[in-house]
Image: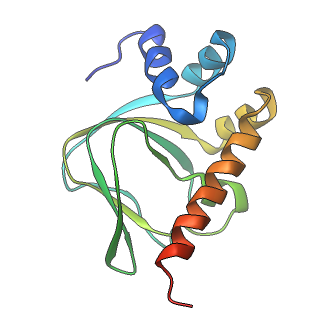
Amino acid sequence: MLLRRSSQKIDFLKKVPLFSNFSQRHLKEIAKHADQVQVEKGRVLVQQGKTGWEFIFIVEGKARVEKNGKIIRQLAGGDFLGEISLIDGEPRTATVIAETDMTILVVHKPSFDHLLDAIPGLQRKILVSLCQYLRRAEKTMNW
């Protein structure tokens, strides 16, 4: 899928739960900072232990998330990744590999920081998504 116009990026962003209830103006700002990238099956999107420089939204396709070589999650259209490393400046917590050819939107660190400051409510939504991530992780742990 090739999103040729900004309006197509905006239409996609409307479908991402993270951006639900955002105004057209805010979606336009996000779209302005998101680069579309085509990814081939088998490509590593992010590598566990490496520094993170981008926030990624999956437009189309599927990916698997691996931690220490073990598959822990599947991702598909509407999912996003990379926020943890961008927020805390620490290395990536997992590796993500394209399981199919994919279309993704990429927001680089300087733009991510700008968007967090410019869009009311984005920080809170990302915080909530991180809490959901932690709850899922706790369910899989043997305490």
Task: Say how the picture is coloured.
Answer: rainbow
The image shows a total of numbered marks equal to 0
Residue 78 sits above or below residue 70 on the image: above
Residue 95 sits above or below residue 70 on the image: above
Q: Residue at x 66, y 35 (%)?
A: 111
Q: Residue at x 80, y 28 (%)?
A: 120
Q: Where does the image place residue 135, in percent across and percent down from the top left?
A: 59, 66
Q: Residue at x 79, y 27 (%)?
A: 118
Residue 84 sits above or below residue 41 on the image: below
9 left or right of 38 in image: right
**Quadrant of res 86:** bottom right
Q: Where does the image place residue 107, in percent across and percent down from the top left?
A: 55, 37
Q: Where does the image place residue 1, in percent across and percent down from the top left?
A: 25, 23
The answer to whether residue 51 of the structure is visible from this angle is no
Q: Where does the image place residue 73, in percent across and percent down from the top left?
A: 37, 62
Q: Quick one: 2 or 65, which is closer to the camera?
A: 65
39 left or right of 120 in image: left
Rendered-image quadrant of the C terminus: bottom right
The answer to whether residue 29 of the structure is visible from this angle is yes
Residue that sits furthest to the bottom in the current view: 143
62 left or right of 112 in image: left
